[in-house]
Every structure is written in structure tokens, then in C-alpha cells.
Image (tube, coloured by chain):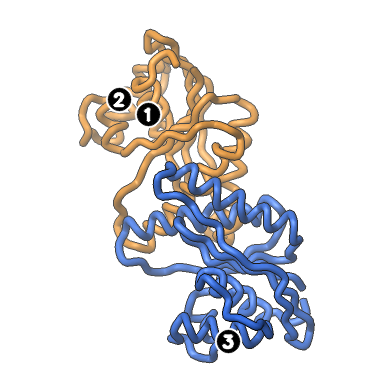
Chain colours: A orange, B blue
Amino acid sequence: MRVLGIDPGLNITGFGVIESDAFKNFQMIRFGVIRTDPKWSLPERLYRIHHGVEEVILSEHPDVLAIEDIFYAENVKTAIVMGHARGAVIVAGMRNNIPVFEYSPREVKMSVVGNGAAAKTQVQFMVRSLLRLREPVQPLDASDALAVAICHSNRHPGK
Amino acid sequence: MRVLGIDPGLNITGFGVIESDAFKNFQMIRFGVIRTDPKWSLPERLYRIHHGVEEVILSEHPDVLAIEDIFYAENVKTAIVMGHARGAVIVAGMRNNIPVFEYSPREVKMSVVGNGAAAKTQVQFMVRSLLRLREPVQPLDASDALAVAICHSNRHPGK
């Protein structure tokens, strides 16, 4: 199974593609970030995110898209912006007939580190370890996206 | 100029298409709502909204998409959901090379009724009057969408 994990954000959206087998062996396929310029209009920034995710889908052919869920934010304005970015990502999956699964940050940390309150650097350490990489994945947004993909694979081994 | 106005919402997204000339004469082309079922998953609901808006774009060929902006919500959870629906709509416009303009509810009311704090029923009354319709537009979501389209046309007459 090939999983595209997404850590959505208006400034930086992290993505990570992994391949997993029935024995929870993971292979890193690709990771990166989609950046937008705060000087762009909101529609331009959303389209950049949407288009960037679609480009990864069309080139890497994931079976599913796993995205970090959000239930809280610092304030209402931040929450609205976060919702926009997630909406643009989810539509990219749905338009390409890829089922979309949502996981809370707590679920992702629990699945990857075994601790729902783990620090981002702990997640980064475990992502590197599970994918047997020489270096920690940078930036953290890409590492978090790979963590979401690992979380989905752990929940659905071998599918 | 043909304008597609959108009043976005996860349960009901209103849409309205009008044609306007340089003298601010408006003609109603089409209006309606896109409904989603609360039993559907969030991705399914967003895709329904996105796809519904795209269907209107492809059949009515608007020159621009005007959408109600949001800056506040009852709480963070509502704000996130509202952001998702707006993101799905904005991406539908951008994918089809249609420029997207945003207007706050206050700007829309000011433009249509002349009072930024007008009640929804006042907006409905003026939408009916400006478009010379026999009946008030129902439901209010569709009337509000037409109001957003009128607001954009007032701001950009004849373009």
C-alpha cells in the first residue's frame, strides 16, 4: 500500500509518501513541502497547495491520502485559515478518487512514538528510525507528514 | 459580466449567477443550493460542494467568482468547518481559471441594502427587487449568494 501523508498549513504544507507491506515494513518514497507566499491572495495560496498535492498524487500514485485532523486552534481566525488549507488538500484527494483518512495529532504521535503528547522532535526521531533514513527529515512539516502516513499504515497494515 | 456568487456552508452552500452591464442592470441567470448530508464523511461533503460549484461554473461560464468572506465564528470548531467549505469552493474557481473575489457579509449588506447591519430578510427583499423577480428567492442561502454576486457587480460595473 502506498500512502500520501499530509501536514496541512497555509504557509507550509508538508507531504510524505511511503510504501508499506503487511509486516509494517516501511519504505520512504518521497517527501517535501509546498510553500506559499504570504504576499499572494488567499485563493492563489490555496490553489498552490491544491495543485502541489495533486502533482504528488499524479506522479507517485498513492492508494490513500492521510491528513492531520484539527480540532483546536489558537483563535477563530487561525482556525478558519487552517480549515481552508485542509479543504484544498482534501479536494485534491477526492478529485483523484483517492480515499481520504483523517487522524488527530494525538493519534499520529501515539502511533509513531507511543505517546500522544510526544514532542515534534521525538516524532522526527522515530520517523527517521522507522524509515531507516541516514538523516532526520527536514523540515518538521515533511517529517510530520511522513508520520501521518506511518500512522495510517499502522492502522491498516497490508491493505 | 457574468458573476457567480457563493454563500459557502458545509450543510448548504448557496449559489447565484447574474449578468450585469455597465449601467448596473442585473439579470438573474440561475440560483440554487448545494446540500450535503451530515451522515457523509467530511471529505465526501467537501467534494460534493466542490463538484457542485464546478458544475455551475462549467454550465454557466461565469467570468468571476465572488464568495462571502468570514472573519468570525461562534467557536473554533465551527470556524474550521467553515474554512473547509470555503477552501473547496475557492479551489473550484481557481482550477477553472476564474478569478475569486472575497467580500465580508458587512460589505455585501452595505452594497445591496445600504446598511452593513441589515437583516437577512432585508437582503432577500432587495435581491428580489434588484433582479426584478416575481417571488423572493428561497432559501436564504441562495438569496445571499445572489447578494454577493450583486455586491461584486456594484464594485466592478461593466467589467
Q: Which residue is mark 1?
A: A147
Q: CA distance from mark 3 to mark 1?
A: 52 Å
The residue closer to the viewer here, A46 or B68, is: B68
**Circle 3 is placed at which residue position?**
B126
Quadrant in the picture for residue B71 = bottom left
Identify which amino acid the numbered label 1 is placed on.
Ala
For disc 1, the chain is A
Specify which label sits upstream in the sequence, 2 or 1. Answer: 2
Q: Where on the picture, by quarter, is residue A156? A: top left
Could you tell me if residue A67 is visible in this image? Answer: yes
Instruction: Name the amino acid type tagged 3.
Output: Met
**Discs 2 and 1 carry the same chain letter:** yes
Q: Is residue A113 above or below residue B142?
A: above
* Residue A10 percent coordinates (x, y): 48, 51
Label 2, label 1: how far apart the Cα atoms are: 6 Å
Q: Is residue A11 visible in this depiction of the protein?
A: no
Residue indicated by mark 2: A112
Local packing at callout 1 (Cα closer than 10 Å; few below 14, some 14-19, many 20+) is many
